[in-house]
Image (cartoon, rainbow, N blue to C red):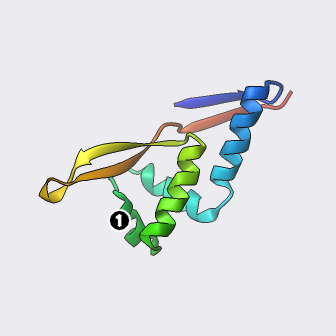
Amino acid sequence: MLLELDIKNEADRLKLQKLAKALCDFKRIEILKLIGEDKEFNYGELAKEIQRSPTSITNHLNWIREGEIIEDLLIEGKRGKMQKIPKLKITEIKIKLK
C-alpha cells in the first residue's frame, strides 16, 4: 500500500512525525525488512532473528505500530496458543514537500 503525505496538510504532518519516530532506529528498519519478507515471524522469532530480547522487540514494534506502518494479525500457533504476527500496512511512502 502506498501512503501519500502532503507537508502542507496538518494531519499529514502529524502522521509524518509518527513515521519519523517509527523509522529513526536501525533495529526498527531491520525488523521492517524481516516483516516485509514472505515468511511470517511472531514476536519471539523476530527476537531470535535480530538477537534482541523479546521485550526489546515488543518496544520496537510498538513504535512501528504507532507510526501505522504495521498491524498485528492473530493466528493460532503451536499448541493452540494465539500468536501476534506483524504485517506491513504500508509498503511505500510518498511525501509531497511543495
Query: Against 44, is 95 above or below?
Result: above
Query: Against 22, is 56 above or below?
Result: below
Q: Quadrant of the C terminus?
A: top right
Left or right: 46 as drawn, with respect to 66: left
Left or right: 56 as drawn, with respect to 75: right
Q: Amino acid at mark 1?
A: Gly
Query: Against 78, is 18 above or below?
Result: above
Left or right: 70 as drawn, with respect to 85: right
Helix or strand or loop: what does disc 1 sit on?
A: helix
Asked where in the image residue 24 lies, by quadrant, the reply is: bottom right
- Say which residue label 1 marks: 44
Left or right: 94 as drawn, with respect to 85: right
In the current view of this chain or complex, which residue is farthest to the top?
A: 9
- Residue 76 percent coordinates (x, y): 20, 48
At horizontal 16% and vertical 58% (from top left) the residue drawn is: 78
At horizontal 56% and vertical 50% (from top left) the residue drawn is: 64
